[in-house]
Image (cartoon, rainbow, N blue to C red):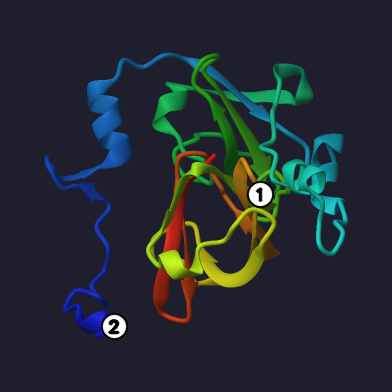
Amino acid sequence: KKAGLITADKRDSQGLCFIGKVKLPEFLQQQLKPIEGEIIEIDREHNLFSLNKIQIGSPPSSDELLLISKKYSYHQNDGKVVGEHKGAHYFTIGQRKGLGVGGTPLPLFVIETNTQKNIIYVGQGAEHPGLLRPSLRVKTEDVHWLRSDLKLNSGEQKQYLVRIRYRQTLQKAVLYQRDEYLFIVFDNPQSAIAAGQFVAWYKEDELIGSGVID
């Protein structure tokens, strides 16, 4: 077993350990009051997604890193209403099931949720540019180095293997440390990056550090 853990190859649980085998969406539906809202589809050709085509320098400037790691921001007039939901707080970025909207050439995926306005933004297909981002950033105060001897100082960079979700295949990326943020730029764009998720980076099988995505 990896790292000598007997549970290393055990299938991960989708339940909430403190209340039993209940899936998170079901738990939320039991605890939170349903509130109807709009499901808005964003076309893959929208000019919002021009960020995915930006070429950065080598090394990139801080302004370039800020730009490519920027989270997409959607508005109601950016797309068309294709359905209704029972509460934006029930859904997560990258979710496919449970939308209740059919008739599209490709399956719909959640690309963003706005719980304040109770809106879900969706796009067609797993390769929709709203799901794929080339980079992310972590506030410097939210970065944790397990190997303090490998800690990057402002202006430094290093290549590591990175994952943004449990059991995801490790992805090649370059970490760039700047004063306010640690930027992670992937060799290949990553799907369903969400603020509040943990990102972790490794040297081979050794965990080097982690942080909370901004």
Which amino acid, mark 2?
Answer: Lys
Q: Is residue 189 left or right of residue 116?
A: right
| Residue 213 shows in the view | yes
Query: Residue 24: image x %, image y %?
Result: 29, 40
Query: Residue 45: image x %, image y %?
Result: 85, 42
Question: Which of these two is toward me, 171 or 145?
Answer: 145
Tell me, yes or no, whether the two marked residues, 1 and 2, touch with CB atoms within 8 Å. Answer: no
Q: Which mark is residue 2?
A: 2
* Within-10-Å neighbours for mark 2: few <14, some 14–19, many 20+: few
Q: Which mark is residue 178?
A: 1
Where, quadrant-wise, is the C terminus in this rendering?
top right
Q: Is residue 11 above or below residue 80?
A: below
Where, quadrant-wise, is the N terminus in this rendering?
bottom left
Element on which disc 2 rests: helix
Question: Which residue is pictured at 49% across the width and 57% down the height?
Answer: 164
Task: State the CA–CA distance, disc 1 to disc 2.
Answer: 33 Å
Question: Which residue is pictured at 80% across the width and 50% down the height?
Answer: 52
Question: Which of these two is toward me, 105 or 86?
Answer: 86
* Within-10-Å neighbours for mark 1: few <14, some 14–19, many 20+: some
Which amino acid, mark 1?
Answer: Arg
Query: Residue 79: image x %, image y %?
Result: 75, 26
